Image (cartoon, grey):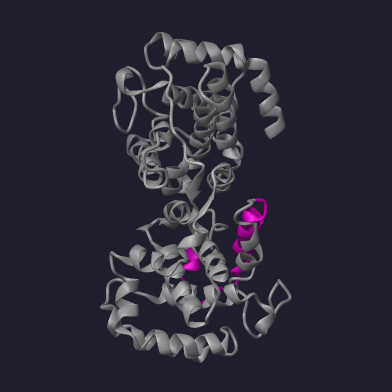
Amino acid sequence: MKTILSTPVEFNLVNLLLNLSRSLDFSNSGIMNHHRKVAFIALRLGHRAGLSDQALMELYKASIIHDIGAVNYQDKLMLTSFDIANPWPHCKRGSNFVAGIPELASTAPIIYSHHDYWQGGNPSGLSGSGIPAASRIIHLADRIAVMVNHDSYILQQAKEVLYRIENLSGRVFDPDLTDLFINLSKQESFWLDLVSPWIDDCMLELIPSSLVNVKRENLLTVARLFAQVVDMRSSFTYRHSFYVAQICRVLAVKAGLSNDDAYLLEVAGLLHDLGKLAVPEHLIEKPGRLTAAEFDVIKQHSYYTYRLLSPVLPGQKVPSWAACHHERLDGSGYPFKMTAGQLDLPARIVAVADIFTALREDRPYRRGMSYGEIRGILNRQAKGGGLDADVVAMLHDRRQELDELWSSLS
């Protein structure tokens, strides 16, 4: 089965980051929508400050992923408190994450300093106007956002938020930005937009439309960024998404898929576990067998992968290919209970690549398996009707190449 797709030469970076950033907002209490709120507030402040179109775009890119360095639920929980003793480790980690991404590298110093105090004493060594303007804006926007309580009517919270921000002006926050915020806060619409279902629309209205598209090849590098965030949550999976993606490309070439399909299949491999950011770390790191209830929690991750990716590449098959890695040809997989007639060749490739990688890796409850053991398991699952036997055979045929890729990722 060969799938031919018409892949756009460019893709919408604003839409990509807007939707992928939702994956960063999973926490023990559900989806927080923190990054959307911070980006909205930051853009409103940026407009008030008279930033250029290019500066507004940089502000958006940094603010919509500003906490990308907070890779576990404990980090995220800490950041929900208004007063944070040591916020900078996640700033440095996030800065390192984006430094090698062509479209995002310029945001690295912004993310690094997005908790810097105006008065100084920061790991960056910066203070006052020496702190990047975008960092100062995001810092203020971030602390405003964490004070918003969705259990209380928003207009009745404005006075308390203003009081706390004004008290820290000139020490923690840029005093000029504080003044801009005071004026902005007089608009009831600002507060209502902040908690409304239309916050995305309100935010997108503020972004210069001429700067939203980037070259298609940069889709892969952005996918690698989010794959790194997923894999960093456990020492047992530090190369999982990257190896799955490499296997997908190797098998795509072996199967004779088009260059477009091979490219998008590699993207699907990188992002197949994006929804795993919704799974608590104690389940990912559990050293023993999962209970039935715990396994039910695990099952949500591929569903979230689909929902997170669907708006990113509308009309493309990447969300389905990525999300179907636990589906089986005999209908025994999850979460959609698809069967052979619904699973095209790329989806079957991702499923085999994921199993092969998982069996090869060390896990909290076992050591990584030998190739002989893995071969036996894959062959049995193919014979039993769960996996595509032709894809399994292609993987065995490329064993030497896959071994070399495994070593390079080590």
Residue 82 seen anywhere in this rendered image of the structure: no
In the picture, residue 146 is in which quadrant? bottom left
Q: Residue furthest right?
A: 125
Image: 320 above or below 25: above
Instruction: Choose between 150 and 204: the one closer to the eye.
Output: 204
Q: How many marks?
A: 0
| The image quarter in which residue 370 lies | top right
Which residue ends up furthest to the top in the rendered image? 383
Query: Where does the image place residue 276, in percent across and percent down from the top left?
Result: 45, 43
Position of residue 30 measured from the top left corner of the image (x, y, whole percent): 35, 56
For the C terminus, the quadrant is top right
Q: Position of residue 355 (x, y in %)?
A: 49, 25
Quick check: is 96 in the magenta stretch?
yes
Task: Please tell me which residue is depicted at 30% across the width and 71% down the height of the picture.
Answer: 150
Q: Position of residue 295 (x, y in %)?
A: 37, 36
Q: Is residue 347 visible?
A: yes
Q: Please give the name of the residue rendered at 51% of the width and 30% of the height, measured from the top-left corner.
A: 260
Location of the N terminus (image quadrant): top left
- Bounds of the magenta segment: 77-100
Please tell me whether residue 244 belongs to the stretch shown in magenta. no
Say if 375 sits above or below 276 in the image.
Answer: above
* Up-down relation of residue 362 to residue 11 (above or below): above
Q: To which quarter of the image does residue 84 belong?
A: bottom right
